[in-house]
Amino acid sequence: MKIAANDPHLKSWIEVSPDSDFPIQNLPLGVYSNKLVKHRVCTAIGDQVVDLYALAELGYLDELGYGKEIFDAPVLNPLLSHGKTAMRKLRNHLSGLLRKDNDRLKTNAEHRSMALLPQNEVEMLLPVHVGDYTDFYSSIEHATNVGTMFRDPKNALLPNWRHLPVAYHGRSSSIVVSGVPVKRPMGQTRPEEEKPPVYGPSRLLDFELEMAFVTFDGKALGEPIACEEADEYIAGMLLFNDWSARDIQKWEYVPLGPFLAKNFASSISPWLVSLDALEPFRTAGPKQEPEVLPYLQYKGEKNIDINLEVAIAPEGGEESTVCRSNYKYMYWNMNQQLAHHTVNGCNVRCGDMMASGTISGKSPDSYGSMLEITWRGTKPVSLKDGSQRKFLQDGDTVIMRGHCSKDGVRVGFGEVRSLVLPASN
Ligand code: MN
């Protein structure tokens, strides 16, 4: 299906620099706040935000038939509850209003001043009320690295790994937006194998480079979503940092999996980039061997070419890039993840969040966690200020960025940026 707003030739009357993540072909959704308004649904273009409530009040969205209150909501859920077709119409409509040859808003200075604000003058809020959050484990390179380090290099992947997208149910209450600091967790670890466990701050705090997708309302309880239908239930994607305390994780995870090592915080970027905007960047995924069961088979190109990077900035210092990866490396794609998640009849709801799992590539500079980059601390990385890191230190800021690029169009996610605070005993 051809999506009008994806035309690479479109230009906006708002100036967009070539390295901006937010050209007219993106038009992500977010929620901002400033001194004057508590929360407003908005989109981004160039270095501006466009207040959709202001547009609705001024009559620019009348054709879409929404009540304007959904643009005055603290989260995107009421808007997303209208589903895929309505979101596509909204994006196409906004694209029309912002394109160079449309004078309607462009020539009305008063209306422009009411609807447009510089991005650096607003605070972006957590965009979605996340009812349920699931974390997959879908990068074969990451799963192999972790299996090699913690279990057996000869049998790094457990027998189920190539047959189903492994996942666990995470914690949604501690999902925070970019800019919110994250406190080093306290907890129970067993640093010495022959001695009893101890209580204290985690000493092996790590990030995990992930992407997450947000769902529209799914089907009723008991009715699975098939692989070929999955796109209709995926609203969009954002950057996701799945903070992990490796020492807590190592001691607690058997036999039920991650718990306190993961649920103290997960950080997301503030812009929900629609799956529609990502369609031009589809690419083939890795070949799956052995062949998967019929309910996990899919047609077409379902991976997405998204360049990803992670940087660490020490307190008061400049940032150093520690990882460059790509979402296209994922062994299991979103369609398979959603099909598997619902195959037993589990229902998903509007605003649910499904994270990919750490996205590692084949080479060590593409590994998506400090655990892998420093190979469990045995190969520390050097930062530009001369200091070294095995894991994260208090005062470090972790920055994740992602963007797609093709045919002269760059569609990006902005960033998720989080300061690590000391533990409070
Ligand atoms: Mn994870």
Image (cartoon, rainbow, N blue to C red):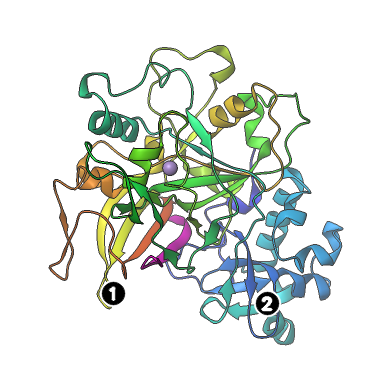
Q: Whole-percent x and y of residue 36? A: 69, 85
Q: Where is residue 261 in the image (x, y as percent from the top left)?
A: 42, 47
Q: Nearer the viewer, residue 254 or 314?
A: 254
Give the residue at mark 1: 315
Relative depth, front residue between 106 and 221: 221
Residue type for callout 1: Glu
Asked if residue 42 is positioned above or below residue 255 in the image, the reply reads below
Which of these two is toward me, 198 or 339? 198
Vertical arrangement, residue 27 with respect to residue 83, above or below: below
The picture quadrant where one finds residue 53 is bottom right
x, y percent for residue 116: 64, 78
Instruction: State whether the magenta stretch is mostly helix, strand or loop.
Output: strand
For marks 2 and 1, give the one nearer the viewer: 1
Could you tell whether 293 is left or right of 75 in the image?
left
| Mark 1, secondary structure of its residue | loop
Which residue, given by chain and number where applicable, does mark 2 sit on?
106
Residue 73 forms part of the magenta stretch: no
Instruction: Check if mark 2's residue and mark 1's residue have beta carbons within 8 Å.
Output: no
Q: Is the distance from the Cβ of mark 1 to the nearest ligand 1 atom less than 8 Å?
A: no
**Alpha carbon of mark 2 to alpha carbon of mark 1: how far?**
43 Å
Work out whether residue 28 can be spotted: yes
Q: Magenta stretch?
A: 407-425
Outermost residue toward the front?
196
Tell which circle, 2 or 1, labels the residue nearer the N-terminal end: 2
- Residue 40: quadrant of the picture: bottom right
- Residue 311 in the figure: left or right of residue 214: left
Q: How crowded is mark 2: few (under 14 residues within 10 Å), some or many (20 or more)?
A: some
Against 62, residue 250 (above or below) is above
Category of crowding for the residue at label 1, using alpha-carbon neighbours closer than 10 angstroms: few (below 14), some (14–19), many (at least 20): some
Judge whether residue 422 is colored magenta. yes
